[in-house]
Image (cartoon, rainbow, N blue to C red):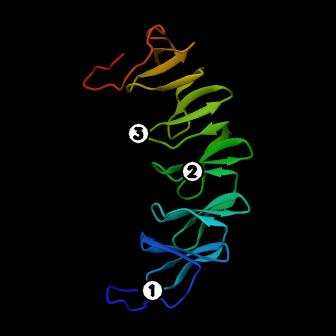
Amino acid sequence: MNVNGERVINKTFDISGEFTEGLAIIGNRGKYGALDKSGNIRIPVIYDGLSRFNSGRTIAEIYEKFGIIDRNGRVVLDVIYDDLGEFSEGLCYAAIGDKYGYYGVDGSLVIPHEFDDAYDFENGKAKVIIGEREAYIKPDGSFLIDTCFESVRPFSDTLFIYEEDGMLGLALSNCKKYTATVYEQIGSLENGRAFA
């Protein structure tokens, strides 16, 4: 309806969401699609679920498999993945079976499916898990820090916080320990200093 209370879109649906990026998710009998502000269906009402739109794309679900559909209903990633993240810094993680890889916004495989778990890219890096160990990778798939430690997280551009036996220390990206694990906690780096 418009601001005058007049019906603008004459279609009725069991569910209709708010407009985001010019599209609203709609639902009928447990299936979902999307329409534009003129009432034109842009994504057919055939999916078991749709996520909110992000940069003109939505994650679509059919039979517990996931894919990505753009705002015009074009399939960017086929609905075949067991887990799927939203695009972040031009990449999204996706799992086939129990292995994760990363795809570009055009649907091309950028980083092969070789990780046991994967996370969104943030500030040019993403956490990945191989076996029981954590690592961080760059958008080209090369390692910022390899799987040297069970638990690791960024501290600065060149240092990482690692954990061993419940204590924390700092390591370089080549896995060389910069400090011993003598800290119970290490805070965020601000103005060249951190609480430890």
Compared across the picture, whether 82 is left or right of 118 comes to right
Q: In percent of the image, x 33 and y 25: which residue is there?
A: 189
Marks 1/3 in contact by CB < 8 Å: the verdict is no
Disc 3 target residue:
123
Point out residue 84 in the picture as x, y percentages from the top left corner.
Answer: 61, 51
Dot 2, crowdedness within 10 Å: few (<14), some or many (≥20)?
A: some
Task: Name the mark on residue 38.
Answer: 1
Residue 174 visible in the displayed image: no
Point out residue 174 in the picture as x, y percentages from the top left corner.
Answer: 51, 18
The quarter of the image holding the N terminus is bottom left
Q: In percent of the image, x 51 and y 71: which residue is there?
A: 71
Q: CA distance from mark 1 to mark 2?
A: 30 Å
Give the residue type that dot 2 points to: Gly
Dot 3, crowdedness within 10 Å: few (<14), some or many (≥20)?
A: few
Q: CA distance from mark 1 to mark 3?
A: 38 Å
Residue 73 visible in the displayed image: yes
Q: In percent of the image, x 48 and y 51: which residue is there?
A: 90
